[in-house]
């Protein structure tokens, strides 16, 4: 279906002021803010929007409280948008904003999703010169990462939702009907999916953990590991609570640091994710390879995974989709 990646995230927050400050500290460009919400831009022209939790213009929530209310996926062109509308309207309600050509619907789990022609204009990012044994690339100069600065998020990398019940059914909605491709899956844990026109290891992860339900996290990408660390250090200095990290994943290979977000769920700052081509053979694992983490910094993070802690469950769901109502297990 010629989907490129996440174009917009729309949050409904119980505390707009805290959510706005969080994303400012996170390293997003603030476009506007007031008591009703805030808008943020990234360098590739994708965006994040925070609104009051009771804003009547917001899509329906999947669970109570602060959370992402809608993920907007960018597609290649109007022909792709038309094809998505025709496909999904066969068995679910699809509405359209006449003024800006956005299609709105819900997936098999009841999560609100939308589609629009992508407006992104990504500029390649040059990696700083790095020295290694026997191959110095930086001569008579300090490393860029040695000079402290504010890290800026470059793009939205991926989103993660809890997927209770029939995981295969939830994933096949994206693969069979929207052209996503399976990169890796772990039995009883989840499916890593990339959009059809993306080379990221994943743009969507459907994570299974009992009957946990709702939005889990959104990941943003910075230049390199130094900027992951600079972002995390800055967030802790501003008083925000770390969820997990710093460390490096096995599946996807990316470095990470997660923080609890007052706008809802968690946000991840990351770098150095695997670049996947059509030559990649999907991998199906019985158990999490390598324990899931290549390395971690903090001893207390050992054995933890993204999404540990207390989350909403199916019992808290607001009008869940059909797959969410299937038996858990």
Image: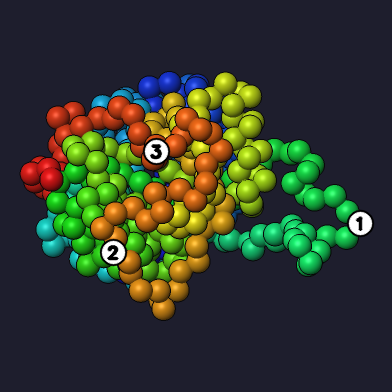
Q: Quadrant of residue 16?
A: top left
Sooner in the amino-acid sequence: mark 3 or mark 1: 1
Sooner in the amino-acid sequence: mark 2 or mark 3: 2
Q: Is residue 107 left or right of residue 101?
A: left
On the question of residue 140 being in view, the answer is yes
Q: Quadrant of residue 86?
A: bottom left
Give the residue number, with chain letter if any, for mark 2: 284
Mark linked to residue 27: none
> Is residue 88 depicted above or below 37 in this figure?
below
Categorize mark 1 by other alpha carbons within 10 Å: few (<14), some (14-19), many (20+): few
Horizontal and vertical percent for residue 68? 36, 37
Give the residue number, with chain letter if any, for mark 3: 303
Residue nearer the viewer, 99 or 296: 296
Sooner in the amino-acid sequence: mark 1 or mark 2: 1
Residue extending furthest bottom? 279
Is the residue under label 1 in contact with that under label 3 (CB below 8 Å)?
A: no
User: Alpha carbon of mark 3 to alpha carbon of mark 1: how far?
Assistant: 42 Å
Horizontal and vertical percent for residue 107? 22, 51
Element assignment for label 1: loop
Element assignment for label 3: loop
Horizontal and vertical percent for residue 203? 40, 56
Element assignment for label 2: strand
Give the residue number, with chain letter if any, for mark 1: 140
Residue at 45% x, 55% y: name it.
250
């Amino acid at each position: 279906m010629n989907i490129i990646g996440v174009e917009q995230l729309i949050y409904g927050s119980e505390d707009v002021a805290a959510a706005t400050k969080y994303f400012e500290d996170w390293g997003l460009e603030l476009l506007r803010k007031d008591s009703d919400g805030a808008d943020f831009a990234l360098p590739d022209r994708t965006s994040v929007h925070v609104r009051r939790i009771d804003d009547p213009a917001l899509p329906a929530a999947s669970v109570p409280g602060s959370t992402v209310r809608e993920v907007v996926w960018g597609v290649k062109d109007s022909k792709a948008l038309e094809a998505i509308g025709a496909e999904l309207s066969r068995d679910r309600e699809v509405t359209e904003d006449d003024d800006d050509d956005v299609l709105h619907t819900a997936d098999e789990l009841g999560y609100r999703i939308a589609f629009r022609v992508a407006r992104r204009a990504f500029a390649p990012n040059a990696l700083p010169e790095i020295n290694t044994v026997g191959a110095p690339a930086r001569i008579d100069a300090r490393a860029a990462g040695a000079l402290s600065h504010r890290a800026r998020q470059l793009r939205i990398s991926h989103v993660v939702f809890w997927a209770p019940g029939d995981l295969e059914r939830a994933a096949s909605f994206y693969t069979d009907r929207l052209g996503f491709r399976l990169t890796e899956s772990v039995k009883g844990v989840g499916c890593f999916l990339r959009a059809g026109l993306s080379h990221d290891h994943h743009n969507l992860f459907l994570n299974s953990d009992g009957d946990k339900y709702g939005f889990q996290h959104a990941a943003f990408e910075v230049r390199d590991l130094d900027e992951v660390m600079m972002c995390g250090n800055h967030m802790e200095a501003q008083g925000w609570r770390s969820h997990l990290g710093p460390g490096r994943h096995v599946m996807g290979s990316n470095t990470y640091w997660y923080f609890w977000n007052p706008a809802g769920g968690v946000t991840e700052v990351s770098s150095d994710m695997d670049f996947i081509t059509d030559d990649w053979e999907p991998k199906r694992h019985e158990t999490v390879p390598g324990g899931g983490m290549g390395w971690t910094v903090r001893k207390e993070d050992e054995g933890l995974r993204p999404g540990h802690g207390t989350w909403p469950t199916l019992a808290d769901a607001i009008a869940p989709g059909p797959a969410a109502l299937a038996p858990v297990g």
